[in-house]
Image (tube, helix red, strand yellow):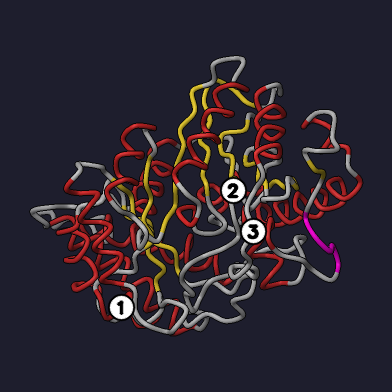
Amino acid sequence: MKTKLVVIQPSPLCNIDCRYCYLPQRMLKKRIQFNTLERIFQALFSSALVGDDVTCIWHAGEPLVLPIEFYREAFRLQQQCNIHNVHITNVFQTNATLINQPWCDFFQEALVEIGVSIDGPQRLHDAQRVDLFGRGTFERVMRGIRLLQENEIRFTTISVISEETTRHPEEFFDFFSELQPVRLGLNPEEMEGSHGSSSLYSATGLLQYKSFVKRLIELNQHAQQPVSIREIDFMLYRIQSAHPHIFAETNTPATILNFDCDGNISTFSPELLTITHPTYQDFFFGNVHTIAKLDDLFQHPKFLSINADIQRGVSRCQASCDYFQVCGGGAPSNKLHENGTFDSTETHACRLQVKMTMDALLEHLEKKYYLDSPPDVQ
C-alpha cells in the first residue's frame, strides 16, 4: 500500500484553546528544525512507499504560528529532496485567526490548499473554540475567511459537532450554505487524547446525531446553494462502488505517515503521534535522524506488536459488524481511547461517524425513492 497522506507537525503550539482539543502539548513553544525537515523529505522521497502523488498536511498544532519565511524554506527543501518528481499537495489545516494579506499572497504563490476549522454560526462556534483567555474566536476566524474569499482562495472546512450543535441543523446548514466551502467535514465530538469526554456519547446523543445528519441531507437536497458534505459523499461512494477490498487508511500501515517536530515517526491514526498510553508508551516507530530508510519502521518490535493488535481488532470488526464494508475496521486511536486496546471492535466514535451517518443516509434514500414500502398496484 502506497503512502497517500503525510502529516507533519511544524509546531505543537496553538494560539487558541478549544475546549475539546485532544493535543496535550498545544501550549509548547517549539518548532521543527530545518535539518529535521530535510531528513523527513529525504526519507520520504527516496522510499518506494511514496507513489506518484502525496498530500502533505501541516497540522498537529496551528501551522500559521510559524512565519511565512519558515514555509518558504520548508517548501524549498521539499522540492530539493523530491528526486522522483512526485506530485505534492501541501495543505494547511488552520483555525484561520492569523490569516492576513501576506499569508494569502503566500498561499497563492505556493499553491497551498487551506482547510479551516470552524464550528458553524457564532454561538455554536464560540461555545467551544475559544482563545487562551476563554473568549470566542468566531469574529477572528471570519476575518481570515473573508480575506481568503476576497483573494479567491477556496477552502474546505471541518466542524466538530457537539450535542448542542445537533439541536440546530437548520442554523448550522444555512451558515455553511452561505459560506460555500469546497467541502464541509463533520467531526462528531470524540473522547480522545487530552479530551476525556464527549457530549454525544450516550443513547440520546447517538439518535440526536443521526437526526442531525438526516436533516442536513434533506436541507442540502432542496438548497439553492448545496454544500459538499464529506461524510455523505464518502458514504454514497462506498454504496455505489461496491468495491470488494475495503480498507481504512487509519488502520493500514504506511498509508498515512506522521512526523512530529522532533522527527519521530508514526503511522496509523494521526492522533497517535501526540499521545502516550500505559500499555504501549508512545507510538513512535523510529526517528528520521536514526533510521536508514522508512521501510525499517515496519521491522521495529513496537510496530510489529501494535500492528498485530490493530489487525486483530480489524478482523473482529469484519467478523461481527454489518457496516464493515463501509468502514474497513475503524480508527485505532478511537479503539484505544474508548476500549483500552486496539484489539477491540465497536466504539462510540464509529457508531456516530459510520453507523448513525449511514443509517441517516439510507433512511433518506429509502424515503426519496420509496424503497421502504412497495408502490400501490391498481
Up-down: is 138 above or below 266? below
- Could you tell whether 228 is left or right of 197 in the image? left
Residue drawn at x 84%, y 71% is 278
The tag earlier along the polypeptide, 1 or 2, is 1
The residue segment tinted magenta is 279-283
Q: State the residue in front, 328 or 293.
A: 293
Residue 39 pos. (x, y %): 72, 33
Q: State the residue in front, 376 or 129.
A: 129
Q: Which residue is mark 1?
A: 124
Q: Which residue is mark 3?
A: 30
Disc 1/disc 2 C-alpha distance (Å): 32 Å
Which label sits on residue 328? 2
- Report the mark closest to the observer, 3 or 1: 3
- Could you tell whether 223 is left or right of 215 in the image? left
Residue drawn at x 45%, y 53% is 64
Q: To which quarter of the image does residue 341 belong?
A: bottom right
- Classify mark 1: residues with Cα within 10 Å, few (<14), some (14-19) or many (20+): many
- Classify mark 3: residues with Cα within 10 Å, few (<14), some (14-19) or many (20+): some
Verify whether residue 280 appears in magenta: yes
Residue 207 pos. (x, y %): 40, 78
Q: Secondary structure at mark 1?
A: helix
